[in-house]
Image (tube, rainbow, N blue to C red):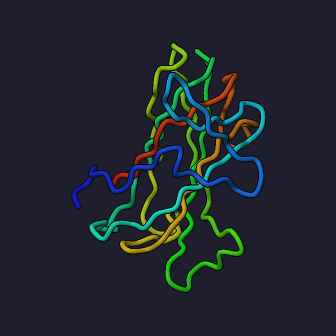
Amino acid sequence: MASGQTLIPFTPQMGEPPASAYATLDTRNGHLVADFDDTTDEALVFKAIMPQNYAATTGVTVYIHYAMSSATANAAGWQVAFERTSDSIQDIDADGFAAVQSVSVTVPATSGHVDITSIAFTQGAQMDSVVAGDGFRLKINRDADGSAVTDSATGDAELWAIEVRET
């Protein structure tokens, strides 16, 4: 596969809630979104199988498409992590996510405008060594408490979609 090509798109309805502190589904003008709170870290988990055409040479970039329910200034902080769940690799009775990669991004100046931000993952440890044909989970979290990156925007961050591209 060529660099920059889409491997996997995720939409809010594909998200699975973790055991606690999860984003909730909502709609905005008929668009299904996942609401991530501004005061409590909340997450969603998406599972997939890495396409066979993934070259696994450089890694992937995760693109986060989101809008803000009310904020028109300041920053939103996002964290993303991979968990490989391939053949005899991960006991699904426990989580085994690799270290999170983070980004803090200035929110759009107009509430409801979709912004797209990205986080690059190098092949190997940052991706929990996911290769073509592997099952995996992708966890996205809003770092509302700002423990890793700046998040000072008020109101919900509304996840519209996620795209995983080959880097």
Q: Which corner quadrant of the image does residue 104 belong to?
A: top right
Residue that appears at 35% across and 52% down: 165
Relative to residue 62, is residue 136 depicted above or below? below
Relative to residue 150, is residue 139 depicted above or below? below
Image quarter in which the C terminus is found: bottom left
Image quarter in which the N terminus is found: bottom left
Q: Residue furthest bottom?
A: 88
Residue that appears at 31% across and 66% down: 54
Q: Of 83 and 160, which appears nearest the observer?
A: 160
Residue 11 place in picture, x, y as percent: 47, 45
Residue 13 place in picture, x, y as percent: 53, 46
Relative to residue 6, is residue 66 depicted above or below? above
Q: Which corner quadrant of the image does residue 156 belong to?
A: top right
Q: Is residue 106 visible?
A: no
Judge from the rendering whether residue 37 lies leftward or rightward of residue 87; answer left or right.
right
Residue 120 place in picture, x, y as percent: 44, 50
Image label count: 0
Q: Residue furthest left?
A: 2
Residue that appears at 61% across and 30% down: 157
Residue that appears at 22% across and 57% down: 2
Q: Is residue 4 visible?
A: yes
Residue 160 place in picture, x, y as percent: 49, 36
Judge from the rendering whether residue 24 lies leftward or rightward of residue 10; answer left or right.
right
Judge from the rendering whether residue 28 lies leftward or rightward of residue 55; answer left or right.
right
Judge from the rendering whether residue 19 lies leftward or rightward of residue 2; answer left or right.
right
Relative to residue 144, is residue 71 depicted above or below? above
